Image (cartoon, helix red, strand yellow):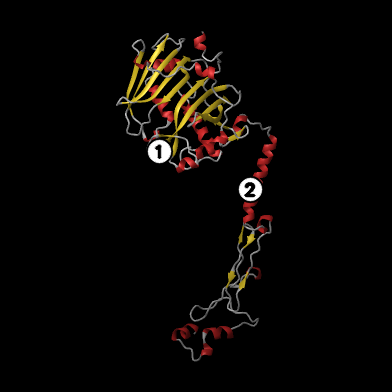
Amino acid sequence: MAGSVAASGFFPNPGSSPAALARGSKNTTGDLPETLSVRGIVAKPNTPPASMQVKARAQTLPKVNGSKVNLKTTNSDKDETVPYTSSKTFYNQLPDWSMLLAAVTTIFLAAEKQWTMLDWKPKRPDMLVDTFGFGRIIQDGLVFRQNFLIRSYEIGADRTASIETLMNHMQETALNHVKTAGLLGDGFGATPEMSKRNLIWVVSKIQLLVERYPSWEDMVQVDTWVASAGKNGMRRDWHVRDYNSGQTILRATSVWVMLNKNTRRLSKMPDEVRGEIGPHFNNDRSAITEEQGEKLAKPGNKVDDPASKQFIRKGLTPKWGDLDVNQHVNNVKYIGWILESAPISILEKHELASMTLEYRKECDRDSVLQSLTNVSGECADGSSPGSAIQCDHLLQLESGADVVKAHTKWRPKRAHGEGYTGLFPAESA
C-alpha cells in the first residue's frame, strides 16, 4: 500500500508530505521511528551521545607554542574576536631601540671583565709615542721632532733601511716643521711671503754621516732645526736617533737657497721672508761639527782620474713619480741615480758611511742623464770585504752639463747590532 502511494505521487495537499507524515507517525513515546522507507520517507540517523554533540558554528581555538592566537568567527547575529595577549617580559616592555642598547651593554660588560682579568702591558711601548706621526716642536720652539717606524717596504736586501729611506724621513720632517710652525704657504715648503713672490727652496749642498742603519720595525726619532747660512741662504740640520736606545743613526746638514719657479733663476732672500723665518733660527746648534765636516772630502774632478776605476750608467730619465709639486725632481732621487753606477760588489759587501753632495743644475722630466762613479781604495773593485773604499760621483746631462757632484765613503758591513768605535773605523784599522 505504501509502495503504491509513493509510486503514484499521491500528495493531495502540503500537509500530506512525507515530512508531515513523519511527524504524524510518532510513536506513543513521542520519538520518530528509527528507520523509514527510502521512498518518500526521510530516515533519521542515530543520535550520538550528548558529550559528543557540538554546535555547528563552534570551533576550537588553535594554539601556537602554547599560546592562543586571534581567530575571527562569523555569526549571522554578531562577530566575536578572541584577543591575543602575549606574555609580559622585560624585553617586550622596552622600546625598539633599547634592544640594541642592551646588546651593546652586554658586549661592553663582557669585554670589561676580560680586560680586568688580563695583566696588560704593551709589548712595544714606543708604538704609543707619537701614534699618528705628526711630530711636535720642542726646545723653546726651535727644534721639531718626529718619529718614524721602519716599514717592511723600506728595507733592502741586507734587511736594513736604505739611505733613500732615511733621506725621505728627513725631508718629511723638514716639511712638517714648516707646517707646524705656521709658515707653510701654498708652495712645497714655501712661506706665505715666498709664495707671493713665486719663490721656492732648492738644496745646494748636503753632508751626512751614517753611524748605523735601522732594521725593520725599528722606531727612529728625527730632530730637525734651521739656522742662517750667509746672506741669502738657510741651513737645515738633522739628528736621527734610535728611539729606544738613543744611539745616533745619522747626522746631516744642508744649505738651501731660493729659486724663482717662473724664471728658474736663483733669488736673493727678501727682507719679508727673513722676517718670517728669522725667529725660528737655532744658530747655537750644529748636527755636524767643523771637525767632522773636515773629514768629509769635497766632491772633485777625480771621475776622469786614470788611476781609478770608472763605472758608468747611461740612459737615466726622470719618471712622473720623481717630480714634486714644483715640477722639480725630488732631491732623494738624485742620490738613487748616483748610486746606480756604483759596482754591485761594493753594495753587497760595504755600506755607505758618509756622503757629500753638491747640486749644480736642476733637471726636468724630459732630461736624459748619465751617472759616473770612480772607485779608489785598497781594492777599487770592492772585492775585498775588509777594505775602505772612497768614490767620486758625477751625474750629468747627455749634453755634458753637470747636475750633481758627490763624494762617498764606504765601510765593510757589520752584523746587525755590532757597533763601531770612531767615526770611520775602517780607516783606523
State the residue in front, 164 or 328: 328
State the residue in front, 25 or 397: 397
Query: Would residue 152 be found to the left or right of residue 105 on screen?
Result: left
> What amino acid is found at the position of numbered circle 1 in the picture?
Lys
> What amino acid is found at the position of numbered circle 2 in the picture?
Val
Q: Residue at x 61, y 61 (%)?
A: 63
Mark 2 vs mark 1, CA separation in Å:
57 Å
Find numbered disc 1 in the image and state the secondary structure of the residue it sits on: loop
Q: Outermost residue toward the bottom?
A: 12
Residue position for label 2: 104
State the residue in front, 113 or 125: 125
Query: Would residue 90 be found to the left or right of residue 335 on screen?
Result: right
Tell me which numbered mark, 2 or 1, is placed earlier along the sequence: 2
Instruction: From this view, report whether residue 153 is shown above or below residue 114.
Output: above
Image quadrant assignment for residue 140:
top right
Q: Residue at x 50, y 35 (%)?
A: 175
Residue 287 can be seen, yes or no: yes
Residue position for label 1: 261
